[in-house]
Image (cartoon, rainbow, N blue to C red):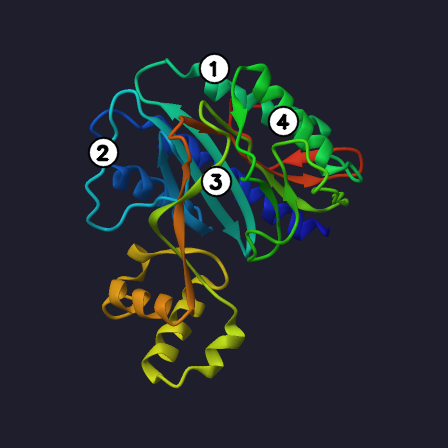
């Protein structure tokens, strides 16, 4: 990895960490989801970075994939377990990071600590040539050691330029299905989820988060309006996920246009990911660059290593 690319990854990581920590610090009873999301995304843009994906605010048994709409009315309540998942990029080089907050109570401190400790263990093991199933085994052992279950069908992932999930998965369980080995200069996001539930997620309702599908299909569209809408979405969001609220002012009748494209198979609307037994869920995530003998975390905050 050349120095310029490395510096862009590190800059994206610093910005994402600042946005994550600032937003998380302001979560309180009665504060709206939209207020926190807007603050986080404004910090990213004010620091001359791009938003790599819509900020996820996932509550309690919702593990991932919810972002508010423009007129969203959700607010935080005392006792909520809040996962804040943030993405920033510099010239397409991505930082992906998450933290879990418990709103004004501490009933689930041990659950939050389980995912945090599992991430720390994974970071210690990450290096060129490590079998990712070994990392999954350690994550599973750590979370179970706290008395909880890892979510087995959610994984960490490799990153590439303008590509949030670039092919390599990092498991949270011991599994022979994961035999890939990272190489020096790989960018990887590791994100253990711990739960009081069954350890699996299922698809819920829509998340308001979208992704353009394979652009080769777009040439087959005969509808001129659809082609124009897609061209605008490509220009603004490249190959990264985007929120329906971002589309207002970019495409006409944003919600209707997105529904039309979804029905035609041109965009994917991500479902919310819900713990199947409605168990509480915690998450901790960092992005790292694999180095010669370990890894360099890009998304540490001020109070981390």
> Is the residue under label 1 in contact with that under label 2 (CB below 8 Å)?
no
- Report whether 128 appears left or right of 208: right
Counting residues from the N terminus, which is met first, the one under dot 1 or under dot 4? 1
Cα gap from disc 3 to disc 4, whole angstroms: 24 Å
The residue depicted at 55 percent of the width and 56 percent of the height is 92
Q: Earlier in the sequence, mark 2 or mark 3?
A: 3
Q: Which residue is mark 2?
A: 75
User: Disc 2 or disc 4, which is closer to the eye?
Assistant: 4
Asked if the residues shown at circle 3 and circle 4 are in contact, with their CB atoms under 8 angstroms apart, the answer is no
Q: CA distance from mark 2 to mark 4?
A: 32 Å
Of 110 and 123, which appears nearest the observer? 110
Q: Is residue 153 left or right of residue 293?
A: left
Please tell me whether mark 2 or mark 1 is closer to you in this view: 1
In terms of sequence position, does the residue under pointer 2 or pointer 4 come before the other? 2
Circle 1 residue? 110
Q: Dot 4: what SS? A: helix
Q: Can you give x and y, in whole percent of width and height, for residue 84 in the image?
A: 40, 35
Which of the two discs, 1 and 3, labels the residue nearer the N terminus? 3
Which residue in the protein does label 3 denote?
16
Q: Are marks 2 and 4 in contact (CB under 8 Å)?
A: no
| Mark sitting on residue 139 | 4
């Amino acid at each position: 990895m050349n120095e310029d690319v490395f510096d862009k990854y590190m800059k994206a990581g610093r910005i994402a960490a600042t946005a994550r920590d600032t937003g998380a610090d302001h979560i309180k009873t009665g504060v709206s989801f939209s207020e926190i999301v807007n603050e986080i995304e404004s910090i990213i843009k004010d620091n001359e970075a791009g938003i790599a994906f819509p900020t996820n605010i996932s509550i309690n048994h919702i593990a991932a994939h919810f972002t508010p709409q423009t007129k969203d009315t959700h607010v935080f309540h005392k006792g909520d377990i809040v996962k804040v998942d943030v993405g920033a990029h510099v010239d397409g080089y991505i930082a992906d990071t998450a933290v879990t907050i418990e709103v004004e109570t501490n009933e689930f401190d041990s659950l939050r600590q389980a995912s945090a400790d599992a991430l720390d263990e994974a970071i210690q093991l990450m290096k060129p040539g490590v079998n990712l199933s070994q990392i999954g085994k350690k994550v599973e052992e750590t979370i179970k050691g706290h008395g909880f279950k890892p979510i087995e069908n959610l994984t960490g992932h490799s990153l590439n330029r303008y590509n949030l999930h670039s092919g390599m998965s990092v498991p949270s369980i011991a599994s022979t299905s994961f035999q890939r080995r990272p190489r020096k200069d790989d960018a990887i996001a590791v994100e253990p989820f711990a739960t009081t539930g069954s350890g699996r997620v299922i698809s819920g309702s829509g998340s308001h988060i979208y992704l353009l599908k394979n652009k080769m299909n777009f040439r087959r569209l005969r509808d001129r309006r659809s082609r124009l809408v897609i061209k605008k979405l490509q220009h603004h969001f490249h190959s990264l996920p985007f929120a329906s609220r971002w589309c207002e002012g970019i495409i006409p009748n944003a919600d209707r246009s997105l529904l039309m494209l979804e029905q035609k198979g041109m965009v994917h609307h991500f479902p919310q990911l819900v713990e199947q037994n409605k168990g509480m869920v915690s998450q901790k995530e960092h992005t790292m660059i694999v180095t010669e003998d370990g890894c360099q975390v890009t998304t540490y905050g001020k109070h981390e290593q």
